[in-house]
Amino acid sequence: MDETDFSLFGKKNKHKKDKADATQTARTPTSEADLKRIIISRPTSDDTYENCQRAGIAIILNHKDVKGQKQRVGTERDRDDVQRSLQAYGFDVRPYNDLSFAEINDLLKEVAREDHSQNDCFALVVMSHGSEGKVYAKDMSYPVERLWNPFLGDSCKSLVNKPKLFFIQACRGENLEKAVEFTTFSVMTRDLGPAPAEKPQHITYAIPSTADMLVFYSTFDKYFSFRNVDDGSWFIQSLCRVLDEAAANEASQAQGMDMLRLCTAVNRKVAYEYQSNTKNEALNQMKEMPNFLCTLTKTFALRVKPKN
């Protein structure tokens, strides 16, 4: 049976402001050093991220029990499967269950302080309840941007010019994605080969602090996200299958697979292969459309690396 990752109860507090909301307005640095600093923006011909020694750190935040919300039955399947899939690429995978917001906040700041200089990227997988612009910790909801703020370029220097990947399995609203049928007479094939890597140039560049991010949501903005109580969520299970297939492809292991093509394959799998099957007629035969926000500035080839 399929369920959603949005509670239908407790709606009276839906718009209540919580403790995790930002309380300070952003300020532009105005110190004497900042005023005197000269920033030079220049073009680059480097179109592929550096191939480093290690895959990187992958954090999994798994939430089964959330205060005031329906228990997320089946999330253990997602946690275990995504852990295995990421470990197959050589990631240092660190799973955490039912953390409070304070614990999540401390954990992410601690991981951001680690040295990522020899890593290809950083990955964070979150599985929880959610609503518009927010995701839930064990004890409360918080703005989704709190997940990546510690890893932005001005906060985590060793991840500058490296991909930062965020996979979020959670509802983003109360809308339901209805099915739309179409007929086609041909099937297109695609070449998934990425561009070859080039040596990095030892030149100073200026880029935005929010550059080099990929935020992959399980569902479209303001829509439900589905999870099967036996088999796990549609999004995480599709992500695992796509990653596993790419990792098992011997021809792709050396040069890697373009991350955006992998994400598109996940979109295609969820969009075409899944629809809800539930006793609740209002939720039955519904669809789901994952989507990603991308500020990657180069091609990122996800490669299988030796385990640490």
Image (spheres, rainbow, N blue to C red):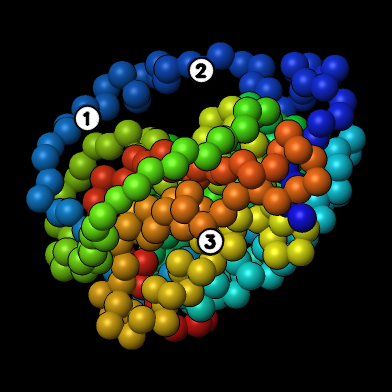
For the residue carrying disc 2, how many other residues have a C-alpha within 10 Å: few (<14), some (14-19), or many (20+)?
A: few
Which tag, 3 or 1, sits closer to the chain's start?
Answer: 1
Reading the image, the residue beneath label 1 is 39
- Which residue corresponds to the image point at 54% horizontal and 50% vertical from the top-left? 167
Reading the image, the residue beneath label 3 is 238
Q: Are marks 3 and 2 in contact (CB under 8 Å)?
A: no
For the residue carrying disc 1, how many other residues have a C-alpha within 10 Å: few (<14), some (14-19), or many (20+)?
A: few
Q: Position of residue 31 (x, y in %)?
A: 41, 19
- Which residue corresponds to the image point at 76% horizontal and 48% vertical from the top-left? 278
Callout 3 amino acid: Ser
In the picture, residue 53 is in which quadrant?
Answer: bottom left
Which tag, 1 or 2, sits closer to the chain's start?
Answer: 2
> Image height check: is 58 above or below 148?
below
**Helix, strand, or loop for circle 1?**
loop
Q: Nearer the viewer, mark 3 or mark 1?
A: 3
Residue 156 in view (yes/no): no
- Which residue corresponds to the image point at 54% horizontal and 72% vertical from the top-left? 85
Q: Are marks 1 and 2 in contact (CB under 8 Å)?
A: no
Q: Is residue 109 left or right of residue 238?
A: right
> Image height check: is 31 above or below 126?
above
**Helix, strand, or loop for circle 2?**
loop
For the residue carrying disc 3, how many other residues have a C-alpha within 10 Å: few (<14), some (14-19), or many (20+)?
A: many
Which labelled disc corresponds to residue 259? none
Q: CA distance from mark 3 to mark 1?
A: 43 Å
Which labelled disc corresponds to residue 26? 2
Q: Position of residue 80 (x, y in %)?
A: 68, 70
**Helix, strand, or loop for circle 3?**
helix
Which tag, 3 or 2, sits closer to the chain's start?
Answer: 2
Q: CA distance from mark 3 to mark 2?
A: 38 Å
Q: Position of residue 302 (x, y in %)?
A: 36, 66
Callout 2 amino acid: Ala
> Image height check: is 67 above or below 116?
above
